[in-house]
Structures are given as structure tokens and as C-alpha cells.
Image: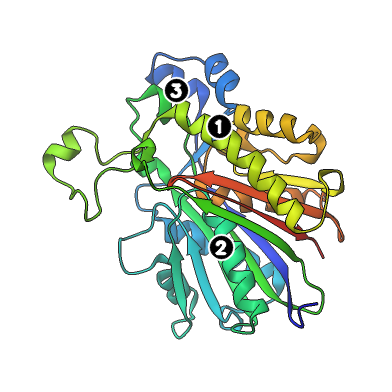
Amino acid sequence: MNPIGVKIRAVGSYAPEKILTNEDFERMLDTSDEWITSRTGMKRRHISAPEQASSDLGIEAARIALQRANLTPQDIDCYVVASATPDYIFPATSAIIAAKLGATDKPAFDMEIGCSGFIYGLTVCAGLIRGGVHKRVMLIGAETLTKFTNYEDRGTSILFGDGAGAAILEASEIDSFLSSDLGSDGSNPAILLLPTGGSRERVTQAAIDAKRDMIYMNGREVFKFAVTKMIQSTARALEKAGLTKEQCNFLIPHQANKRIIDAASKYLEMPPEKVLVNIQEYGNTSCASVPLALDEALQGGKIHPGDIIVFVGFGAGLSWGAVTWRWQ
């Protein structure tokens, strides 16, 4: 037994007030509510205001988590942010959030591994606590994907929404972290990427005119990859924890596409009541999707102490991962 365990003490989430519905897209593009719903499961998405950055959403989620935990920002030893849409290339969005909360002296760092970020973050933050480095860590998934969405592209524009989720992890006599399975394959980044803005390709007027400052995705390839990796990573995480899929109470997947979730769940023989889905309300919020779904389930009274949860995600990189967690 690990002498230092870890648990999630509190969770908070936030989504912007503005809503973009399927009916809105009917007026914008050659599409329909039926087409969007049947292919994605999505009905609505929350859209950040022009002045809102990812840190602004993350701060709101963090404040809710702190309030529920009855903690102050200074009670957190380290701040970690998972995001594909940070405020800047540098400095770290986590440092900005910590400072705005009033914790300017705390360590903070970001994780950029696409939509798998919260799963990777759970593994890293749990390791920091179980290894005795920190006693309490704030993990935030925050995204403003709509700022990088090409609304002329019917295939991708309907998918993305904005939001944030925060989890406070802390040391515990009982260990909730049961296993982790992580992976990546960067051999073909063009499958899912934002072409400009990094050192490979700077943002130029020509790039902006060509919409290369927006998200590009090969939907067919992402679908095949996502289903396969969700199945494999979930199975491996449960195996590492010495558990069967029958012992899993809940699967909380990255909310990318309802058809992906349904296909993987069917293969894993997970009944619908065990698979937590809220994609109809938020769309794909990348690193924020898993904590948003977790918070919704907790507030709805679905999750109870002792429940076995598998968090699973996949995303750009390409990347994937699953974590097995016993709730306490």
C-alpha cells in the first residue's frame, strides 16, 4: 500500500452564458438539427464572450471548487492547467489563474496534450501527491475552442464549445488512484491540429486568409482512432487496477462525439446508465469535458463513495489515456 494516497476533495465547473444551438447553425450553414444530432449527439454549446480567455473560465471553475472544499487559494500547493487553448504560448495560463486568485507564490504549470489533458493531469497531479511532493493540487481543464473554430466549415464548426472544470486533489489515508494508462502517437499531427501560431508556422495574413489559424480535423481518421483507443485504454486501465468492466460503476469519457462514445461503450459492454454523457449541452470542450461531466454527475447525486470510475479521453497529438479511480 502507498503510505500516501490521494482523493478528489471537490470539483467545480463553469460554462459561459451565451448559447449556440443547432437551430442557430441551420441559419448559418447548409445543415439541420437532425443532421447534427444524429452525427454528434450535440444540441447546444456554450460560447465565451470576446473578452473571455481560457484563464477567465478556469478561474470561475476554480472558485466554485474552492468554495465547495472550504479552502482558500493559498491552501493549494500547486496549480496545473490542461488546455489546448491557453491564453498565450507563454506565460503559463496556470500562473495567470493562480495570480488572479491571489496565490502569486505557488508553483504552476500547463499541460498541452489536446483533449486528453485532464486524464494526463489526473495522473500527474496524483503522482505529485502520492510521491509526497505536494499535499494539495488544483487541476483545471479550461478551453475557449470557439475562438479557433472555422464557422464556414460544416464538419468542424458544429462540434466545439467553451467551458472549464476544476478538481482539487489532496493527500488521503485511502488511495483513490487505482491505475493509469497513457499513450501518444505524433507521427501524423495533421490529422487534428491548429496549423499556425507555433514555431513550425507563424501567423501571417496569408495564413489567416487561408483559415490556417483555425482548427483542422480529419473526422474519419479521428473517429477510427478515438473508438479504438477508448476501448483499449479503458480495458488496460481496468486490468492494471485488477478490476473487470463489470466492477466499473461509471465510465466518464471525453465528450467529443456521441457516436464515438456509443461505439466504444457497446464494445466494452457498458450499459447506458453507466456511461455519463452531457455532450448535448456542451459539445466538445476538449480538456474541460471530463470535469464538466464529473461535476454534473456529482451535483446530480449519481456518484457515491466506493464507486469505481474510469475517466477516458483522446485527442490531438494524437493522444489517449484512461484513469481508474475509486470515489471517496
N-term mark: 1 or 3: 3
* Three-letter amino acid code at the position of disc 3: Phe
- What kind of element bears circle 1? strand
Colour basis: rainbow
Q: Position of residue 236 (x, y in %)?
A: 69, 50
> In 3D space, how far apart are the residues under numbered discs 1 and 3 (Cα atoms)?
10 Å
**Residue ID at (57%, 39%):** 282
As drawn, the label of residue 44 is 1
Q: Secondary structure at mark 3?
A: helix
Tell me the quarter of the image containing the C terminus: bottom right
Q: Is residue 282 above or below residue 310?
A: above
Residue 265: x percent and y percent? 72, 34
In this picture, residue 230 sits left or right of residue 217: right
Residue nearest the observer in this picture, 208 or 98: 208
Query: Closer to the observer: label 3 or label 2?
Result: 2
The residue shown at (77%, 59%) is 241
Circle 3 residues within 10 Å: few <14, some 14–19, many ≥20: some
Residue that numbered label 2 is attached to = 121
* Residue 218 horizontal side relative to residue 124, left or right: left
User: Do tag 1 and tag 3 residues touch (Cβ < 8 Å)?
Assistant: no
Q: Amino acid at mark 2?
A: Gly
| Residue at x-position 80% and y-position 61% | 327
Residue 163 seen in render: no
Q: Return the disc, 1 or 2, that comes first in the chain's sequence.
A: 1
Measured as percent of width and height from the top left, residue 127 is found at 62, 73
Label 3, on which residue? 25
Q: Is residue 185 visible to the viewer in this orientation of the structure?
A: yes
Nearest to the observer: residue 133 or residue 105: 133
**Residue 281 percent location from the top left of the image:** 61, 36
Q: CA distance from mark 3 to mark 2?
A: 33 Å
